[in-house]
Image (spheres, rainbow, N blue to C red):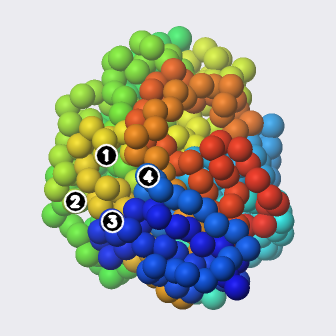
Amino acid sequence: MLDLIIKNGSCYIDKDLKNQDIGIKDNKIVEIGKISNKASEVVDAVGLTVLPGCIDTQVHFREPGSTDAEDLHSGSRAAIVGGITSVFEMPNTNPPTSNKIEFRKKLGLAKNRMFCNYAFYFGATPDNASELADLKNLEGCCGIKLFAGSSTGNLLVQHEADIEKVFQSSSKVVSVHSEDEEILNMRKKMIKEGDVLTHPLWRNEECAISSTRRIVRIAERYKKKAHILHVTTKQEIDFLSQHKGNITFEITPQHLTIFAPDCYEKLGTYAQMNPPLRDKSHYDRLWYGVRNNFLDIIGSDHAPHLKANKEKNYPNSPSGMPGVQTLMPVMLNHVNNEKLSLKQLMDFVCENPVKIFGIKNKGFIKEGFDADFTIVDMNKKILIKNKNIESKCGWSPFDNFEFKGTPVLTIVGGQIKMRDGQILGEPDGKPLFF
């Protein structure tokens, strides 16, 4: 007797869509094919596309410290409503997750409170190199997060000698918020009070590419893995396409969907994030990077803030926007518009995260693998509304956007956690293994 059978779906197996049934027992995929066994529960996926559980490698769930805007529980609700079965959560909390004591506390906070599976980043500081050298076997640790430029929180490693120390000591992938702090400080004079259009002038493309060149040079010198987060500039696309191998990078759905100046005119400070949304020439080059498979991962950089804070006068408004719930609808809409293929999207949210970070038993529909699935209706249209956002922040930059293609079922560890936008069952997500 199986626990669950997913029948009649078009399943993404071995880089192709195949009409197969999937049998699940004890949280694992145990059978693929035409299944005649009985099961406690059957999902009829006729007309639906069954994908491996999708992974968002960049979320800020704000706990501990800023739990008015988000916490691990509410963030995980947003994740499963958006078809995301696993997340990598960021360390720029208060206190920061930059030592093993705080790291284990965070694992404790997540236990039986998160609907999706989870892993946490270990924050790099100028003086925790000895801790960074010893993360290989730390349960639930996906990698090291390095802020080369200041953003939300107080984790910053700005000086070259300190960045070198981080890479030299690293025992995991180092994921980098890549902006040059010196250039940021020098260009502060570009900030005009009350004018969010000066945000991309202050945090200009030179600030991004200068930092990324330095990170790549250091990582290559020490033969370490560097992963550049939320790449936003045409210069970085061209540069990073020449430095593959140990260097990987990701782009956010928002940088592939909205651009300046329109986004600032429509959304004001709600469009403010670091690094910023830039003009169409950068947007076009990011898509060039997608089309040519220079890109490795799409991650949401889910970074919620309450409306009251986002509506403060620029530059007192904080940077960041929610995105874990909308990553899949946004990108499935782009698949429907033929801007990328489903195979590419699966590389970006399933297979490449598994390969780059070494996640065990995720990202593929294979016997013996964990029973995590994102089941989508490629023809269903969804209108994003602030009132339907599960995040505590209660808004989305995509409010009133209509997208075609959306997750309709989220299955985590063989349990249905979301059906047609409704959350089901208990928050019993597990730490990821590496």
C-alpha span from label 2 to label 4: 29 Å
Within-10-Å neighbours for mark 2: few <14, some 14–19, many 20+ = some
Q: Which of marks 2 and 4 is in front?
A: 4
Query: What residue is pinned by disc 2?
Result: 293
Disc with the residue nearer the chain's start (2 vs 3): 3
Label 4 crowding class (10 Å Cα cut-off): few <14, some 14-19, many 20+?
few
- Separation of disc 4 and disc 3 at Cα? 12 Å
Q: Position of residue 11 (x, y in %)?
A: 41, 66
Which residue position holds label 3? 17
Q: Is mark 4 on a helix, strand or loop?
A: loop
Residue type, numbered disc 2 = Asn
Q: Position of residue 151 (x, y in %)?
A: 55, 43
Please tell me which of labels 3 and 1 falls first in the chain.
Answer: 3
What percent of the width, then of the height, locates residue 328?
47, 47
In three-dimensional space, the C-alpha distance between marks 1 and 2, rounded to whole angstroms, equals 15 Å
2 and 4 marks in contact (CB < 8 Å): no
Q: In which quarter of the image is the C terminus?
A: bottom right
